[in-house]
Amino acid sequence: MISEKTKYALGSVTQIPLGEGRNFRIGDTEIAIFHTRQGIYATQAECPHRRGPLADGLVGGTQVTCPFHAWKFDLKTGEPQMGSCALQTYPVHLTESGDIELTFLGEAARFAS
Ligand code: FES
């Protein structure tokens, strides 16, 4: 298990159109990064229901709707707004130059496949 924070530079936010998500792989872990008007958010890439690709979901405000069966999740907290399981979220921010910087905490290792 990773016990310390590790920061990963994932490139410019311009590679993710506003209102969309994209997947990034860090080691064995796939992370979905969402670029919204409210900010940038990072969650597990697969829906906890039946592994739908969340980055392909409909993004509105700070919510994503899974493209498979329409479960809805708050991107800030990972909490389900429709559905019964929460998403793992990850700390992420933009640098002054607009690059995505993701921080993996120790618990992230539990979600590595
Ligand atoms: S796989 Fe996401 S709602 Fe079913």
Image (cartoon, rainbow, N blue to C red):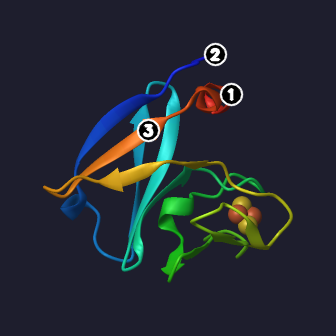
Residues tagged 1 and 2 counted as in contact (Cβ below 8 A): yes
Tell me the CA gap for discs 3 and 2.
15 Å
Eye-nearest disc, 3 or 1? 3
Q: Which residue type carries mark 3?
A: Thr
Q: Which residue type carries mark 2?
A: Met
User: Which residue is depicted at the point 76% across and 68% down?
Assistant: 80
Secondary-structure class at tag 1: helix
Q: Which residue is mark 2?
A: 1
Secondary-structure class at tag 3: strand
Viewer-proximal residue among 72 and 49: 72
Viewer-proximal residue among 99 and 49: 99
Mark earlier in primary sequence (3, 1): 3
Tell me the CA gap for discs 3 and 1.
15 Å
User: Which residue is depicted at the point 50% across and 83% down?
Assistant: 61
User: Extreme right residue here?
Assistant: 84
Q: Which residue is mark 1?
A: 110
Q: Quadrant of residue 98?
A: bottom left
Q: Which residue type carries mark 1?
A: Arg
Q: Position of residue 13 (x, y in %)?
A: 24, 59
Secondary-structure class at tag 2: loop
Q: Position of residue 12 (x, y in %)?
A: 19, 53
Q: Which residue is mark 3?
A: 103
Tell me the CA gap for discs 1 and 2.
7 Å
Q: Position of residue 22 (x, y in %)?
A: 39, 57
Residue 92, placed above or below residue 20: above
- Residues packed near mark 1 inside 10 Å, few (<14), some (14 to 19) or many (20 plus): few
Residues tagged 3 and 2 counted as in contact (Cβ below 8 A): no
Q: Which numbered disc covers residue 51? A: none
